[in-house]
Image (cartoon, helix red, strand yellow):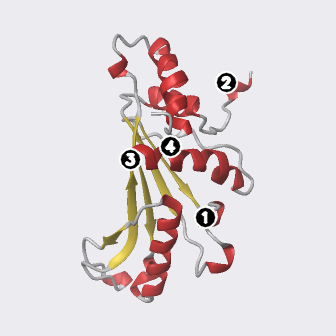
Amino acid sequence: MDNQPRLKKKYLETVKPYLKDRFKYKSVMQVPKIEKIKLNVGIGEAIKDSKLLDAAVQELTLISGQKPAISKAKRSVSNFKLRKGMSIGAHVTLRNTMMYEFLDRLIEISIPRIRDFQGMPTESFDGRGSYNFGIKEQTVFAEIKFDNILRSNGLNVTIVTSAKTDEEAYELLKQVGFPFRKTKTEDN
C-alpha cells in the first residue's frame, strides 16, 4: 500500500476528507473521485502520410506509458478525401495507478512548461463533472525529445470524475493541485 502514487495518497489523506466536509456528504462513497483520463490525438494528414500517424502513436505511448488505440473514420467525407475506416488518430484511456502518475506529471512538469501559461480555463467543464482541455504542442511533455518530432501535434485531455456537478469536479481538481486560472471573485 505504501508504493501508491503520490497524488493518490494526497487524494486519500487530504482531499477526500476535505470534500466530504465541504459538500456535507453522508457517506465517503459519495465523495467524487477521478475515474479515468482520456488522451486523444487527431492526425488529419495521416490520410496522405501514414508516418505521421506512426509518429503520433509513438509519442502518445511515451506520454501515457500505454499503447494507444488507432481511431478510424466513422464515415466518408469527400471534401477531405476521407473514406470510412481510414486511420485518422489515436487515443488512450488511463485508469488507476497510470492515471495518477500521468496526472502528477501533467500538473507538476508539463503544464508549467506551456508558453505564456495563465492557468487552465474554468469554463471547460461539461456539466456532468468531466473536465476537457487541449494542449497545442506535445513538446510540453518531458518524455518527448524535441529533435525526434516530425510534426507538432495537439492533444486533447479529458479528465472524467464521478462528481455530479461542475462545482464538485472543480473543487476536486483544485484540491488535487490542478492550476486553474484565477477568476475575478478569487482575486478580491
Residues under labels 3 and 2: Cα distance? 34 Å
Q: Residue at x 46, y 82 (%)?
A: 45
Q: Residue at x 68, y 33 (%)?
A: 182
Which residue has dot 3 on it?
95
Which residue has dot 1 on it?
143
Amino acid tagged 2: Thr
Tell me: residue 141, above or below residue 184.
below
Residues under labels 4 and 1: Cα distance? 26 Å
Q: Is residue 53 left or right of residue 73?
A: right
Q: Nearer the viewer, residue 51 or 45?
A: 51
- 4 vs 3, front mark: 3
Which residue has dot 2 on it?
185
Amino acid tagged 3: Arg
Residues under labels 2 and 4: Cα distance? 18 Å
Q: Which mark is residue 124?
A: 4
Residues at marks 2 and 4 touching, judged by CB atoms closer than 8 Å: no
